[in-house]
Amino acid sequence: MKKLMILIPLFLIICSANGQNGDLFLSFKGGYGINRIGYAGFSFEFPTEGFTQNEIFADFQENKKSGYQTALAGFGIKPVLVRYTNTAFRLMFGAAIGSDFERFIAAPHVGCEVSQAVRSRIELFLGNKNQVILWSPTSERWRFMAFAGIRFPLI
């Protein structure tokens, strides 16, 4: 009970932040996908009208089972579906180009993301990315990944 009494004021302080206010962000994310796919990436995000975020990103993915690796860079759009003071639910649409270290590949994707702003406008987020990799081996074509990350405001 004593620990709970300490956590309640801490939670109220964290929830007093105001997020999704149109800042520039630098984000780092990592995750895991179906068929043992490891995922890591970072991005630069900038706002447009209606709290929509545009994203310039770089991703690295590796299939742990087969050893197939991809390095991608691209652009994405994240329109907001639902927004509250500290929370936003966004759809993600985008495309990337890159290499699997043998050939050129392209990868359009769709997904969604939920972000929660904490103190100092830092955001924590969870999401999923559903991706098709064009010009890759047939067994590596589809990617379904879940990720988590942190987003820092650039001032």
Image (spheres, helix red, strand yellow):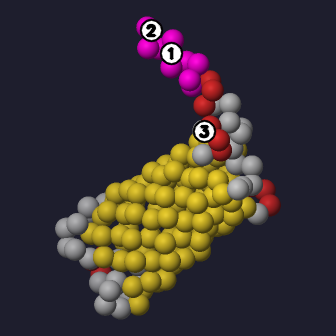
User: On the image, which quarter does residue 71 sit in?
Assistant: bottom left
Left or right of 38 on screen, residue 117: right
Report the residue that reaches farthest toward the top.
1
User: On the image, which quarter does residue 40 sit in?
Assistant: bottom left
**Residue 83 spot, x, y in % from top left:** 70, 44
141 magenta-colored: no
Question: Which residue is depicted at the point 63% across and 31% down?
Answer: 15
Instruction: Identify the image quadrant of the C terminus.
Output: bottom right
Q: Which residue is mark 3?
A: 118
Left or right of 108 on screen, residue 83: right
- CA separation, marks 1 and 3? 18 Å
Q: Main secondary structure of the magenta part?
A: helix
Q: Which residue is mark 2?
A: 2
Type of the residue with mark 1 = Ile
Type of the residue with mark 3 = Val
Residue 6 tag number: 1
Name above or below for residue 126 compared with residue 15. Answer: below
Type of the residue with mark 2 = Lys
Q: First in sequence: mark 1 or mark 3? A: 1
Question: Which residue is depicted at the point 60% across and 31% down?
Answer: 14
Instruction: Identify the image quadrant of the N terminus.
Output: top left
Question: Which residue is depicted at the point 69% across and 64% down?
Answer: 46
Marks 2 and 1: in contact by CB < 8 Å? yes
Left or right of 134 on screen, residue 114: right
Residue interval drawn in magenta:
1-11
Marks 3 and 2: in contact by CB < 8 Å? no
